[in-house]
Image (cartoon, rainbow, N blue to C red):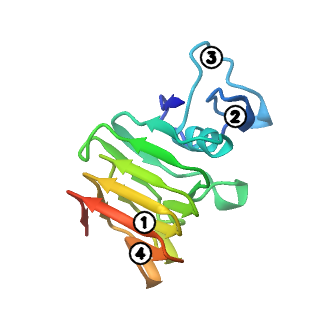
Amino acid sequence: MTYRVNSLADAPDANPGDRKCERAVPGGTRTGAPDGLCTLRAAVMKSNASVWKDTVEVPGGLYQLTLPVAAGGGHLPITDGVKIQGAGAARTIIDGNHADIVLYVQNEDLELNHVPVQGGNSQAGGGIRLYAGSSEFTNLVIRQNNALTGGGGLYLANGALLKLRRSAIL
């Protein structure tokens, strides 16, 4: 299934199991908007809840992960195979707001295209942490991330495999 992000906000999905990407609003109610607001976090939650590899299309914009870790925010966990397709390295940016890892891939595959990842901060793997699985990054820039023990931009563990094409880690 393909989820199309249409909101720059950082909000979880109202009901991850219903296959409809729709952000939760304060109080846990749905948005009520006829077109629905699908955030990047909500789309990733939808993909994680499915049993097949989904695609998340992310249009141009700065997607800051501002939801506090204590409120279920922080990094975007990838627990099921997903393709995240951006609109171009100069147009679509995922920013961790220097609060946590930006993307944490847990035993699954991540295909990441045309999306810079920046502003991550963690013990290890500030930008992207690959914890097993096989991932592929194309036309990607990983920049301005920090880690205390290693892998400021990118950290691979537990036999994680990565194919990197036309990409840079700065």
Name the outermost residue toward the top.
34
> Residue 48 in the image: x percent, y percent?
63, 46
Q: Nearer the viewer, mark 2 or mark 1?
A: 1
In the image, what residue occupies the spot 37% across and 71% down?
A: 153
Judged left or right of residue 160, residue 43 is right
Which of the two residues, 96 or 89, is positioned nearer the viewer here? 89
In the picture of the structure, the residue carrying the numbered disc 2 is 24
Q: Which residue is mark 3?
A: 33
Give the structural element (helix, strand or loop) at label 2: loop
Q: Are marks 4 and 3 in contact (CB under 8 Å)?
A: no
- For marks 4 and 2, the one nearer the N-term is 2
Mark nearer the N terminus (1 vs 4)? 1
| Marks 2 and 1, the one that precedes in the sequence | 2
Q: Is residue 147 left or right of residue 104?
A: left
Please state which of residues 80 and 149 is positioned toward the viewer in this rendering: 80
Q: Residue at x 42, y 66 (%)?
A: 127
Distance in Å between CA atoms under marks 4 and 3: 38 Å
Q: Kindly indicate the quadrant of the structure image that contains residue 45.
A: top right
**Three-letter residue code for mark 1:** Gly
Q: Which residue is mark 1?
A: 127
Q: In the image, what residue type sits under mark 2?
A: Ala
Mark-to-mark CA distance, 2 and 3: 12 Å
Q: Of helix, strand and loop, which one carries label 3?
A: loop
| Crowding at mark 3 (Cα within 10 Å: few <14, some 14-19, many 20+) | few
Residue matched to label 4: 146
Quadrant occupied by the N terminus: top right
